[in-house]
Image: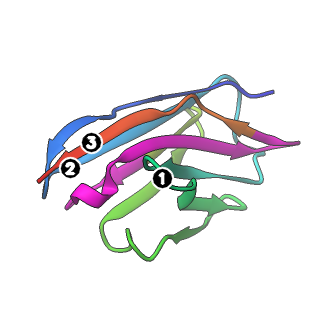
Amino acid sequence: QVQLVESGGGLVQAGGSLRLSCKASESILSANAMGWYRQAPGKQRERVARIINGASTNYADSVKGRFTISRDNAKNTVELQMNSLKPEDTAIYYCWVLTMGANWGQGTQVTVSS
């Protein structure tokens, strides 16, 4: 079981930026996939962005062009750069890494005020 710890959430005004970071307890070099999900109050958890097989990335339509996912194998981190934030981006953001099974972080709150 890989332990994941997210950081970087907070309160920001619409149009602002935040950078989320997810630190893994062990190497993520061999992970099959990794990414970020989010869950807003009263809504289902949805995938935001992911990296598959180390290189291929894909994004939810709602964040394309605004969010960028990246990984740093040396630091065992997965990061999410979020620009041009909107109030509808408000949610708890969860880090996810797929190794032998799915591993989840505890979540970090992102709140975007209008």
Per the model, the C-alpha gap separating discs 2 and 3 is 11 Å
Magenta range is: 80-102
Which one is closest to the eye, mark 1 or mark 3? 3
Q: Secondary structure at mark 1?
A: strand
Q: Secondary structure at mark 3?
A: strand
Q: Which residue is mark 3?
A: 111
Instruction: Select label 2 or label 1 by which is in front.
Output: 2
Q: Is residue 77 above or below residue 15?
A: above
Which of the numbered marks, if any, corresponds to residue 17?
2
> For the view shown, which residue lies furthest in the bottom direction?
61
Residue 107 image position (x, y, % from top left): 51, 33
> Are discs 2 and 1 less than 8 Å apart at CB?
no
Q: Where does label 1 land, which residue?
A: 70
Amino acid type at circle 2 is Ser
- Pinpoint residue 74: horizontal percent, then vertical percent: 57, 34
Q: CA distance from mark 1 to mark 3?
A: 22 Å
Q: Can residue 75 be found in the magenta stretch?
A: no
Between 66 and 37, the one lying in front of the other is 37
